[in-house]
Amino acid sequence: MSDIHLGAKKYGERIIYEDIFRAFEESLEAVRRDHAEVLVISGDLFDAPHPDNTTLVRALRLIKNFVSHGIKVVAAHGEHDTPGRREHSLLSLMSEAIEGFYAPALLGAGNLTEPQLVDLTTVKLNGVAFMVYPFSKVSIDEKRKIYSRLSPFYDSRARELRRDGIKSVFVAHMPVDPVFPFADETVTSVRSFPRVNYVALGHIHKREINYEKFADGNLWYAYPGSLYPLDIKEARETHKRGPLLVDLSSDEATVSEVPVTVREHYVIPVTIKEPGSVYYDLKGAISKVMKSPNSQPLVHLDITALPGIPTRLIEAEANRIAKELNLIVIPHVTRAVDESASLPRGEAKTSIDIVKMLQEIVGNDEFTAKVVLELAAAAAEGEEDAVDSALEKLASWPKSLEILRRLSAS
């Protein structure tokens, strides 16, 4: 599994925090039921490199109890697990403190040769070699250079292991082509993977299970996807949640989905044109949600509001309706231009694409442009949670940080 994000408190909702832990615990139980020998976590076990004490204690208890059943854990670092400074990560500390938990890291490795780095990041368990590719918080160009330098040595070692009859798994937290839709942000392509028996990937939150054809057979790879829908975008995804079960008993891996139950998520669009209609517009949209007597779904309201309708009013009415209907409602407000506004006679109506303008400033990175605008709107409204959410998005994406650092220096 990957992209679990223990400790995440998206939109300030405590229920999301609890749901993520519940999904993780249920996934660990499913792994035990299927008698797996090793659990691979392909990055972002935690939502932050320094989680709060409650999150840390709960996570440690779950993992220590899990490995006590004899199942080993191999964890890769992701951008959320990795501190920004040169310090030991929580995963590396857990690796030292918990028997049966392995999270290779390069901090303090010194000037090792490439073969030595491969050895340092390889964990051999139950007759399988897990090659955990090191994650580093550097620019995308630097990541590509590092991968180009190291991948031939991982491939060479994988082929040596295969000749010796030893299975191998390559574990990496990175976006790859063609799975990731933005080619200029990918580290490499699936064609460059080492010739292992299976590639366990993380970072992309949408599930992808596929294989690449080679002359000597098929190489299976997978992104399990996020364990729980972390935002409105992921709530729109319909892929199954839970771990993947990988059988390496034959030469070609067999991948099966192990679904776990997570709270139902709905995304409902709604347009609000008048302050006086907020309650009725929201109530009409939310009433479309069908729920069973024993469930309490989470409803994301994708709200388009005309100027002059206060965000605080929308949020207050959404909370009121949530209590009335026993639902969890999260309003997401964007502002629309009032097309009915009159213009002086003879003046042509023009439209300005602010996102496109900002994209040019930030080097054609649409994600960074949109989040910067989101941050500006949240700051203008005085919405602290929305400001925190936008800052989290910028901090979690290395390219955004690189762009902002460049702009601040210019």
Image: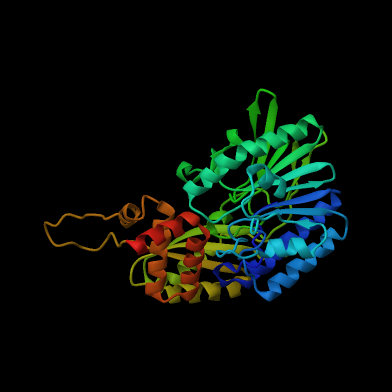
Residue furthest right as drawn: 69
Q: From the viewer's perspective, tell me whether residue 175 is left or right of residue 37.
A: left
Residue sitting at x 41%, y 77%: 382
Query: In terms of image quadrants, where is residue 58?
Result: bottom right
Residue sitting at x 61%, y 51%: 111
- The reply to whether residue 330 is in sight is yes
Please state the horizontal and vertical placement of residue 359, each as a whole percent of the image.
35, 53
- Residue 242 higher or lower than 85, as above or below: above
Residue furthest front as drawn: 111
Q: Foreground residue, 385 or 211?
A: 211
- Residue 211 higher or lower than 360, as above or below: above
Q: Foreground residue, 87 or 133?
A: 87
Residue sitting at x 81%, y 53%: 72
Q: Foreground residue, 237 or 250?
A: 250
Please state the horizontal and vertical placement of residue 44, each as a whole percent of the image.
64, 58
Please state the horizontal and vertical placement of residue 199, each as a whole percent of the image.
68, 41
- The reply to whether residue 293 is in sight is no
Residue furthest top as drawn: 215
Q: Foreground residue, 63 or 158?
A: 158
Q: What is the number of callouts on the image?
A: 0
Query: In terms of image quadrants, where is residue 267?
Result: bottom right
Residue sitting at x 52%, y 43%: 145
- Residue 9 higher or lower than 205, as above or below: below
Coloring applied to the structure? rainbow
Q: Which quadrant is the C terminus positioned in?
A: bottom left
Residue furthest left as drawn: 346
Please state the horizontal and vertical placement of residue 98, each as a whole percent of the image.
80, 63
